[in-house]
Image (cartoon, rainbow, N blue to C red):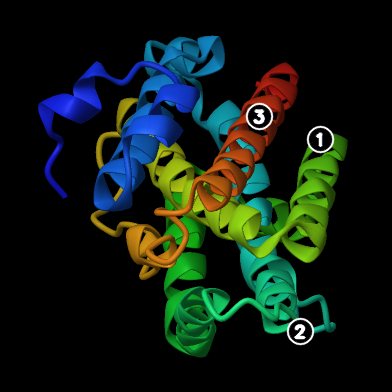
Amino acid sequence: MENSDNIKTVTNPNEAMEQLVGEQFVEWLKEHIKHEFSHWPIIQGLSVANLQPQKLRKLMIQWFFVQSAFWGSKEGDPGFLGFAIGNLSESDDPEAETALEILVTRKNQEQILQPQQHLFWHQLLLVLGAPEEEIQKTKPKEITRHYIAELSDLYSNAAWQTVAGGLAAYDWIGNLINQVIIDLSKKAVLNPGSLEPKSNMDAGHLLEKTIFDPQNKHLVWLGTKKQLDLHQEFLIGLKKYL
């Protein structure tokens, strides 16, 4: 998507919803997320930090719990993706069908994608000196459990457009957090490995049927804003463990 001059002159969500449609609105959302993320004090602090490996491991393991919650568990928890699919499946709005198809396709890739994610984080933790016992026995902190519960509620109960906006933002913010962790890892050890976490969800396509109608754009924005707020709260809550 081209980042036109029109997008650059839009400075707030209300202007974006009034002036931008289609790919321009999606691109504005993505750029807004990057801008907000880079200006969070917690991210600015981490970007210049030199965390010891044992502290970085604590951050990574908690983030890994969140990543795992996206997929759900063998014990029957549908995960963020499963909650979203269930929500959109119940919608009578024909415009929800395209987003639902994208999510179902993503779910069908689980057997390929999830092992890659586990392998990436597991190997990076080992490179940082985490004993296997630490990886297996560490539990989610209270802030992590709260974050997972809030997102589960969002994807289960919000309007489908808000769910789509939240999931797109989850994908974009997650990629930014992954890069921060990789950069911190490179500071902590000489060679953190060449693996990179993979994500196959095309967040822009997820929103393609929601970005023309003003009401839909508003609902998408609500999901994006909620996701930003919860991510920031989660990272701030983790700071006390670093």
Q: Amino acid at mark 1?
A: Ile
Instruction: Work out which quarter of the rendered image holds the C terminus and state it.
Output: top right
Residue 235 appears anywhere in the view: yes
The residue that appears at 55% across and 40% down in the rendered structure is 221
Q: Secondary structure at mark 3?
A: helix
Q: Position of residue 131 (x, y in %)?
A: 61, 52
Q: Amino acid at mark 3?
A: Asp
Q: Amino acid at mark 2?
A: Lys
Q: Secondary structure at mark 1?
A: helix
The residue that appears at 76% across and 56% down in the rendered structure is 158
What residue is disc 1 on? 143
The residue that appears at 68% across and 20% down in the rendered structure is 236
The quarter of the picture where residue 72 lies is bottom right
Find residue 74 and name its label: 2
Q: Earlier in the sequence, mark 3 or mark 2?
A: 2
What residue is disc 3 on? 229
